[in-house]
Image (tube, helix red, strand yellow):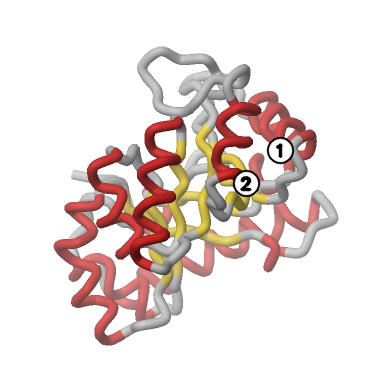
């Protein structure tokens, strides 16, 4: 993607975030735009970095390890967020590479991350992923299990910043975003990782602090 196109796509998404924030009487800079770069190689990512984007999201530890160390050599201030499911045996690798982990969803992963963080002396921000629609095929803890998982994460001294969700496809996302926002408030959490290319404006009006945008920035995947 040419730098001109990357700059235009980035400006467009930022303008849409700013407009949605204004509607909700929020400041646009209260929303972190995470550019979802999964499946895109370094050559596709570099133009967005050159255009000024500094926060990126990946789905898999191994894929991120293959491209980000080199990209970060020239742009060390890039922040990297893991937004995909994390296996407990990859906890150490994730803690070493990522600045935030959005998919904490079970007790075994809390324990693995706590060990990895203690060992590395590094504590990436954590979001607990909630399976907000109760979908069997999706990751995330159930709404009912959240209080005990959150308590365990806090006991383990994980830096829990907020909650994350992916609403059911094909359904109006607003009620699910509103439910996540209410649950976060009830547990004294400020961070809300919610909203993707098709619904990030709705998420921003409901209080998203982090939106995960791929297609609107990179174009449709092949």
Front one among 158 and 83: 158
Question: Among all residues in the image, which is located at the extreme right?
Answer: 25
Question: Dividing the picture into quarters, in which one does residue 56 lie?
Answer: bottom left
Q: Residue at x 57, y 64 (%)?
A: 14
**Where is residue 71 shown, x and y percent of the image?**
24, 76
In the rendered structure, which disc, 1 or 2, sits on the residue that comes first in sequence? 2
Question: Dividing the picture into quarters, in which one does residue 152 lie?
Answer: top right
152 lies left or right of 102: right
**Where is residue 198 shown, x and y percent of the image?**
50, 39
Q: Is residue 139 above or below residue 19?
A: above
Q: Is residue 125 above or below residue 174?
A: below
Label annotation for residue 162: 2
Question: Among all residues in the image, which is located at the extreme left?
Answer: 66
153 lies left or right of 107: right
Binning the other alpha carbons within 10 Å of mark 2 as few (below 14), some (14 to 19) or many (20 upward) gives many
Q: Residue at x 54, y 29 (%)?
A: 130
Q: Which residue is mark 1?
A: 184
**Where is residue 83 shown, x and y percent of the image?**
40, 46
If the image is split into quadrants, where does the N terminus sit? bottom left
């Amino acid at each position: 993607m040419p730098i001109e196109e990357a700059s235009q796509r980035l400006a467009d998404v930022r303008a849409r975030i700013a407009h949605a924030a204004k509607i909700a009487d929020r400041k646009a800079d209260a929303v972190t735009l995470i550019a979802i770069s999964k499946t895109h190689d370094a050559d596709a990512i570099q133009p967005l970095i050159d255009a000024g984007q500094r926060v990126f999201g990946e789905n898999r530890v191994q894929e991120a390890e293959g491209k980000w160390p080199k990209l970060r050599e020239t742009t060390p201030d890039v922040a990297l967020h893991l937004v995909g499911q994390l296996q407990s045996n990859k906890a150490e690798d994730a803690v070493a590479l990522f600045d935030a982990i959005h998919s904490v969803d079970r007790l075994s992963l809390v324990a693995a991350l706590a060990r990895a963080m203690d060992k590395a002396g590094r504590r990436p921000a954590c979001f607990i992923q909630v399976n907000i629609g109760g979908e069997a095929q999706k990751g995330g803890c159930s709404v009912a299990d959240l209080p005990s998982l959150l308590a365990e994460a806090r006991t383990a001294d994980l830096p829990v910043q907020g909650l994350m969700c992916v609403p059911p496809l094909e359904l109006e996302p607003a009620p699910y975003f509103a439910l996540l926002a209410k649950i976060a408030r009830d547990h004294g959490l400020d961070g809300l990782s919610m909203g993707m290319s098709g619904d990030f404006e709705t998420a921003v009006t409901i209080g998203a602090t982090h939106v995960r945008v791929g297609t609107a920035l990179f174009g449709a995947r092949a």
